[in-house]
Amino acid sequence: MMDSLDTFRLYVNDGLSDEEIAAQAARYQPLAQDLRDLIVLSIQSRGGDDDILAARKHLSDAKSILERDRETGPYGTRFNDSGTFRTWGNAAIGLRNPIAPPLDLQFEDDGRVWADFHLHAGYEGPAGFAHGGVSALVLDQLLGDTARHAGAPGMTGTLTVKYRQPTPLGDLRCEALLDRIEGAKAFAMGTISGPDGVCVEAEGVFIAPKWMREQREHTGVQGVQ
Ligand SMILES: CCCCCCCCCCCCCC(=O)SCCNC(=O)CCNC(=O)[C@H](O)C(C)(C)COP(=O)(O)OP(=O)(O)OC[C@H]1O[C@@H](n2cnc3c(N)ncnc32)[C@H](O)[C@@H]1OP(=O)(O)O
């Protein structure tokens, strides 16, 4: 089980320059998009035995190349001296994670957070509609980042999700705002909307864990992001 020390080890100042971070983003983001395209093709290809075997051979070659120089374990949260944070492995927003839709969250000065995003065929639950767990993933990240944006980063304590109508796959919008902060707890609420209006509503409580509160008390530093 991970304790707070393990958590801290996954918050790393790796000292990269902003230029190197930009170069890495330009290098790895297209790879994630290629893999996203492959997820859809895995579902939609009509290839016969020969085509699929040939494609798998190419993928096997690609795996061998990517394995030549690699890290192990989760990506964590990395940052540099100019304060650029990267959560590139994150399942909802990670720049290097093909599982992520991804959400490109927009932070407004008035505290609202929103994103236009796309759920492809790989996010299907009920036929033709988004999986409810994927909607919860999107809302968890959105509301959590809304709390963080308001200066109250925390782990999800409770996320309440109400599915008002089926969420179509395709182009969607999510938006959220902070309701209030009470001590260690931040309350946020948000929605996912499709062409026919709001499909999913959520409320979330995001809690600064005890170890983070103690760190703040001792150092005066707000804490991890
Ligand atoms: C680490 C920070 C990360 C920051 C990420 C920013 C990026 C954001 C985007 C990421 C988005 C994705 C995010 C993810 O996916 S986060 C991943 C999913 N969430 C988790 O895994 C959380 C697991 N649980 C915990 O870590 C702890 O139990 C937490 C942190 C929840 C409590 O911790 P701690 O044990 O230290 O708390 P406390 O006992 O001193 O109680 C403190 C207060 O909280 C109240 N309470 C307790 N539990 C709950 C509950 N479940 N619901 C509602 N309220 C609860 C409690 O009554 C008390 O209230 P009050 O008496 O003061 O009124």
Image (tube, rainbow, N blue to C red):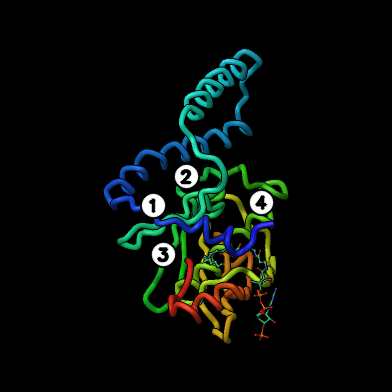
Q: Mark 4 points at which residue?
A: 129
Residue at the disc numbered 1: 14
Left or right of 77 on screen, residue 192: right
Viewer-nearest of labels 2 and 4? 2
* Mark 2, secondary structure of its residue: loop
Q: Earlier in the sequence, mark 4 or mark 3?
A: 3
Of the residues shown, which amino acid type is indicated by label 2? Arg
Q: In this view, does 79 lie to the left or right of 175?
A: left
Q: Distance from label 4 to label 1 (Cα)?
A: 41 Å
The numbered mark, 3 or 1, whose residue comes first in the sequence reads 1
Residues tagged 4 and 3 counted as in contact (Cβ below 8 A): no
The relative height of residue 42 versus residue 93 in the rendered view (above or below) is above
Q: Reading the chain from its start, which is encountered first: label 2 or label 1? A: 1
Q: Badge 1, how many Cα within 10 Å: few under 14, some, many 20+?
A: few
* Ligand 1 found in image quarter: bottom right
The alpha-carbon separation of the residues under discs 4 and 3 comes to 25 Å
